[in-house]
Image (cartoon, rainbow, N blue to C red):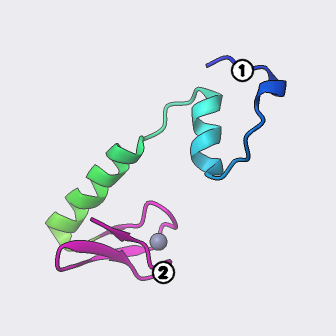
Amino acid sequence: MLLAPGELRTEPLFADDAEGACAGGRRLTLDERMSRVWEGLRAAGTAECPLCGGRLELLGEVGRCGSCGTTVS
Ligand SMILES: [Zn+2]
């Protein structure tokens, strides 16, 4: 992706994702990250939170992070 610096006008609401995309580096997409989270949740009942790196635990139908409170479903 080639962008002149002057064209980068939007606020980096999701700085990590935006930087990864613009730098052209190979990063996991959100879908891939969520797939890995669910693999862990199904296999072990816990997984690493994709947002904060904390511990997600399977609660019924969703995974919930004990550190930042994010839920994944
Ligand atoms: Zn978290």
The residue carrying mark 2 is 67
**Residue positioned 16% across, 65% down in the render:** 42
Residue 56 picture location, percent across and down: 35, 74
Instruction: Please give the name of the residue rendered at 34% of the width and 45% of the height, measured from the top-left corner.
Output: 31
Label 1: state its secondary structure.
Answer: loop
Split into 4 quadrants, where in the image is the N terminus? top right
Question: How many discs mark residues in the rendered view?
Answer: 2
Residue 10 position (above or below residue 41)? above
Task: Give the spatial CA distance, label 1 vs label 2.
Answer: 36 Å
Query: Within 10 angstroms of label 1, few (less than 14), some, or many (20 or more) residues?
Result: few
Which is nearer the eye, 70 or 41? 70
In the image, residue 47 sits, relative to residue 33, either above or below, namely: below
Q: Is residue 1 left or right of residue 73?
A: right
Bounds of the magenta segment: 47-73
- Observer-side mark, 1 or 2, equals 1
Which three-letter amino acid code belongs to the residue tagged 2?
Answer: Ser
Residue 17 rendering spot, x and y as whole percentages? 57, 44
Identify the residue position indicated by label 1 in the image: 3
Q: Is residue 49 magenta?
A: yes
- x%, y% of residue 45? 20, 74
- Indicate which disc residue 51 carries: none
The disc labelled 1 sits on which kind of residue? Leu
Residue 5: image quadrant is top right
Mark 1 touches mark 2? (CB < 8 Å): no
First in sequence: mark 1 vs mark 2: 1
Question: Is residue 11 covered in magenta?
Answer: no
Q: How many C-alpha atoms fall within 10 Å of the one at disc 2: few (<14), some, or many (≥20)?
A: few
In the visual, does 55 lie left or right of 39?
right
Q: x, y percentage for residue 70?
A: 43, 73
- Determine if the C-beta at disc 2 is less than 8 A from ligand 1: yes
Q: Considering the numbered disc 2 on the image, is that residue within a helix, a strand or a loop?
A: loop
